[in-house]
Amino acid sequence: MPESRPYHHGDLRAALLAVAERTLREKGVGSLSLRELARETGVSHAAPGRHFKDKQALLNALALAGYERLAQTLDAADDPTLPLQPRLTALAGAYLGFATEHAELLELMYARKHDPDAAEQMAVGIDKTVGSLERVIADAQKRGEIVEGDPERLTLVVGAALQGIAAFTTGGMLDPDAARDTLDDLVHHLLHGLKPR
């Protein structure tokens, strides 16, 4: 009986990205190679070159796919009709879920150097994710729900707090259930501060 292969026909690019993301998750970015992806998808060594000119192009494509999925995750969690605190808590929960489930991909999205040719696409991906949170912050400012100031700076504070919880969770310092339970307090303290009232 012939060995079953993950790719038979259809969208080779999507198949390569799926195998690349699995490799990234299981073995890290250093284990990614176009030749190994070809072997794992059961195609010729030259086939991936039709979609990715080199490993950097593959990394860029993975990061862009990650931004698209994160944007979808945040969009699905966002309810503009909610008051700010539950709205931010829902967005924080969606982000935490994505960040813990796709920690290696998120690191690639945030920390890797991307090809200058992909800069415009990365900017669009960032705007769909970080930009959506910044727009929530700016809208809350317009409604007088939070302090005035640069929405970009306020978004950085919120994002850093969320990423901190995610890093504690993926690093094993915080149990995923405890991390989710912390989100209500996190958002409350972000909105109201730590000063006694």
Image (cartoon, rainbow, N blue to C red):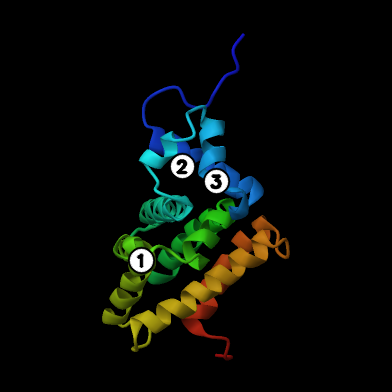
Image mark for residue 33? 3
Relative image position of residue 117 (x, y in whole percent) = 32, 62
Apparent side of residue 60 relative to residue 196 in the rendered image (left or right): left
Figure quadrant of the C terminus: bottom right
Q: In front here: 191 or 161? A: 161
**Residues at marks 3 and 1, CA–CA distance in whole angstroms:** 20 Å
CA gap between label 1 and label 2 equals 20 Å
Residue at 59% across, 64% down: 166
| Residue 64 against residue 19 in the figure, above or below | below
Q: Residue at x 37, y 42 (%)?
A: 51
Total tally of numbered discs in the picture: 3
In the rendered image, the residue lying farthest to the top is: 1
Mark 1 lies on residue: 116
Between discs 2 and 3, the one toward the N terminus? 2
Q: Residue extending furthest front?
A: 46
Eyeballing the image, is 29 above or below 141? Answer: above
Q: Amino acid under label 1?
A: Pro
User: Is disc 1 in contact with disc 2, using a CB cutoff of under 8 Å?
Assistant: no
Return the residue nearer the eye: 166 or 54.
54
Q: Amino acid at mark 3?
A: Ser
| Residue at mark 2 | 17
Q: CA distance from mark 2 to mark 3?
A: 12 Å
Residue 44, image x, y percentages: 47, 29
Q: Which amino acid type corresponds to the residue marked 2 in the rendered image?
A: Leu
| Between discs 1 and 2, the one toward the N terminus | 2
Whether residue 80 appears in this view of the structure is no
